[in-house]
Structures are given as C-alpha cells and as structure tokens.
C-alpha cells in the first residue's frame, strides 16, 4: 500500500539523519542490525558507525523524502540524498522489528 505518512520509527530515523544525530541514528538499529549500501553490508553498531562516519552522518547527509510505501514491516522511502560523499535519488528499504531497524538497504531511486 502506498502511504504519504512515514511510520514512526522510520520518520524518527530520517529526522535523526537530517539532524546529523549520530547517537539517535545508531540507536535506531536493533542489536545485530545491518546496512546494505549497494551490496556492501555492514553489520552491528561498530561496522555501521564506521561506514556512517565516512558516508552517511559524517558526510553531513540529508534525505528529502519524495515517496513512501509501507508493506507489513517493510518501509520503502525514495528521496533526494545529498551529502559530501554521494548525491542523487536513492531508494531506502527499511526492515523493522517493532520500533527498531533490522536492516536498511540503499539502492538507486
């Protein structure tokens, strides 16, 4: 189903990213959570932080949401990503377990 409302955990996550709030960004992930950035997978808080320091929060990234789709515990957000590392329309797929992210997958939007 397509919805214009971003579910709370993902909305809070995007807000943390846009504020460059590293603690809130990292706390959004479940223990053992993962980021899949174009096939490069970073698992657990330490690996996610290392990736983010260079390519996400550390790159002053911001996401302007354009589309949202919710299907069960999966939320897909397409938007305009801007950072000092990479720019362009991107698709973020969030897998949730309750209020925590178990996986964020990033691909071309």
Image: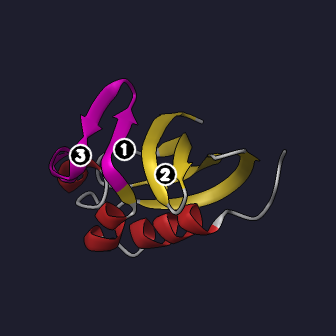
Using the image, tell me which numbered label, if any, was put on residue 33: none
Kindly identify the residue that appears in the image at 51 percent across and 43 percent down: 88
Q: Earlier in the sequence, mark 1 or mark 2?
A: 2
Q: Residue beneath label 2, please?
A: 81
Magenta segment = 30-51
Label 1 secondary element: loop
Q: Is tag 2's residue or tag 3's residue first in the polypeptide sequence?
A: 3
Q: Is residue 48 left or right of residue 74?
A: left
Per the image, is 44 magenta?
yes
Quarter of the view holding residue 58? bottom left
- Residue 23 horizontal side relative to residue 91, left or right: left
Q: Are marks 1 and 2 in contact (CB under 8 Å)?
A: yes
* Label 1 crowd bin: few (<14), some (14–19), many (20+), radius 10 Å: few
Q: Is residue 32 left or right of residue 64?
A: left
15 in the magenta segment? no
Callout 2 secondary element: strand
- Crowd rating for badge 3 (residues with CA inside 10 Å; few <14, some 14–19, many 20+): some
**Residue picked out by circle 1:** 86
The mark found on residue 44 in the picture is 3
């Amino acid at each position: 189903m397509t919805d214009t409302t971003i579910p709370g955990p993902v909305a809070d996550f995007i807000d943390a990213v846009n504020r460059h709030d590293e603690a809130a960004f990292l706390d959004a992930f479940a223990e053992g959570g993962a980021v899949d950035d174009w096939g490069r997978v970073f698992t657990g808080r330490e690996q996610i932080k290392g990736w983010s320091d260079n390519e996400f929060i550390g790159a002053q990234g911001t996401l302007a949401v354009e589309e949202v789709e919710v299907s069960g515990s999966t939320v897909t957000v397409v938007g305009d990503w801007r950072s000092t590392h990479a720019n362009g329309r991107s698709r973020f797929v969030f897998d949730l377990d309750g209020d925590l992210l178990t996986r964020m997958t990033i691909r071309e939007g």
